Amino acid sequence: MRQRLLVFVLSAIGLAAAAGPAFSHHGTAAYDTTKTVTVTGMVTEFRFTNPHVLVYWDTKDETGNIQKWSGERSGPNSMARNAGWNRNTIKPGDQVTISGRQSKNGTYTMAISKIVLNGKDITGGGDN
Amino acid sequence: MRNDLRAPIAALAVALTWSSGALAQAPRQQPPDLSGLWSPVGTYTFDPDDPRGGRAADLTRYPLTAWGLEKFKANKPAHGENQEAQSNDPTNKCFPPGAPRSYVTPYPMEIVQSATRLAMLFEYDVVYRLVYLDGRGHPSPDDYVPTWMGHSIGRWEGDTLVVHTNGLNGKSWLDRVGHPYSEEMQLTERFRRTDKETLQVDLTFNDPKTYTREWNGRKIFRLRPTWELKEYVCEDNYTFDEFQTESGVKFVP
């Protein structure tokens, strides 16, 4: 019984980890602001959502393995006003080169500071 | 023919005389119009010289009482120079920012003004604040349960609208860097349009439970004539969704 419970708990932890990064709160304390990383890849999902818009994209590391990245930018109201974004600005399949501050815990998560979409810089303002 | 014109000319003369008399009897000066969509400059503090709150713990700037200091130390901001990864900012759990914290969100407010009311419509969390300009006073504390926005009355002093607020519940933070306040807060704000594009609000915080003396803040807003208010509902946040999941209670509309 106890063993079964342990298996269940471990499975639950595994599921939670697989659910992806949590942009748990506002602010930049969770990010390493001492350096900028740049990652090129293909968009898998775009969420035009509060409090911050979210971009998910895949890239391949040196050995050909897929790294699943995600990043956040300002809220949709700010992005619409300051950068002209809407919910269709980024689509699955788009090629992106995204720069930002990576999560301190080493996960493939970042606070986006620059985003080049299909060769065009669409970063805009919106640092709110 | 000339005679035919006399009557209408006389009527016009009477009309002009009457209307100039009416103008002479009109109020000497209309109060300034503060209406418009206003976007705050700096979204963390009420100190334009310290917009990110690097001096938030400076007790010469923020004269906290022992009670206030204890509250301040317990507050863990998600923003600014002293932000912490694990914040207990009440707005992260979708509690309202209240007054005056609604000025320090990164979202604009629309002011709608009439002779007897000034309404501030805040984009963040679709809340409003109403200032009575009709000469009424504050309700008796016995009749007013303290609220997030408090009770506000205002009067014009020349080109400045002076607003006094009490009845605040003290449950929010004053700003985004964790400064506390209490139900004893007496807030005075002076609204002035320093130029066509700029609204300046000077705030005086008088809260003897939380601060040993009065202290002042300032908020600058820029007019955004091409913007429209958008909706921002905190419960739409994916962070609120995560919070609900962590809490084990999840309501999906």
Image (tube, rainbow, N blue to C red):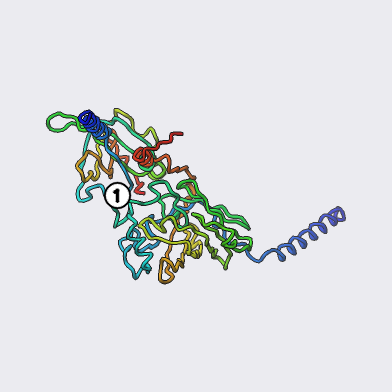
Q: Is residue B180 above or below residue A26?
A: below
Q: Name the residue at the right extreme.
A: B3
Q: Is residue A125 above or below residue B60?
A: above
Q: Position of residue B112 (x, y in %)?
A: 56, 52
Q: Is residue A105 above or below residue B200?
A: above
Residue A58, visible in the rendered structure: no
Q: Position of residue B253 (x, y in %)?
A: 46, 34
Residue at 34%, 51% in the rendered image: B88
Which residue in the structure is indicated by mark 1? Answer: B86
Left or right of residue B134: residue A73: left
Residue at 28%, 31% in the rendered image: A43
Quadrant assignment, res B103:
bottom left
Left or right of residue B13: residue B167: left
Q: Position of residue A72 (x, y in %)?
A: 31, 41
Q: Is residue B27 above or below residue A50?
A: below
- Crowd around label 1: few <14 · some 14–19 · many ≥20 (10 Å): some
Left or right of residue A52: residue B26: right
Left or right of residue B242: residue B221: right
Q: Name which residue type carries label 1.
A: Gln
Given residues B211 and A103, the one toward you in this image is B211
Quadrant assignment, res A47:
top left
Could you say whether the residue bearing mark 1 is in a helix, strand or loop?
loop
Total residue callouts: 1
Quadrant assignment, res B154:
bottom right
Residue A21, visible in the rendered structure: yes
Residue at 39%, 41% in the rendered image: B237
Q: Position of residue A12 (x, y in %)?
A: 26, 32
Q: Chain of mark 1?
A: B
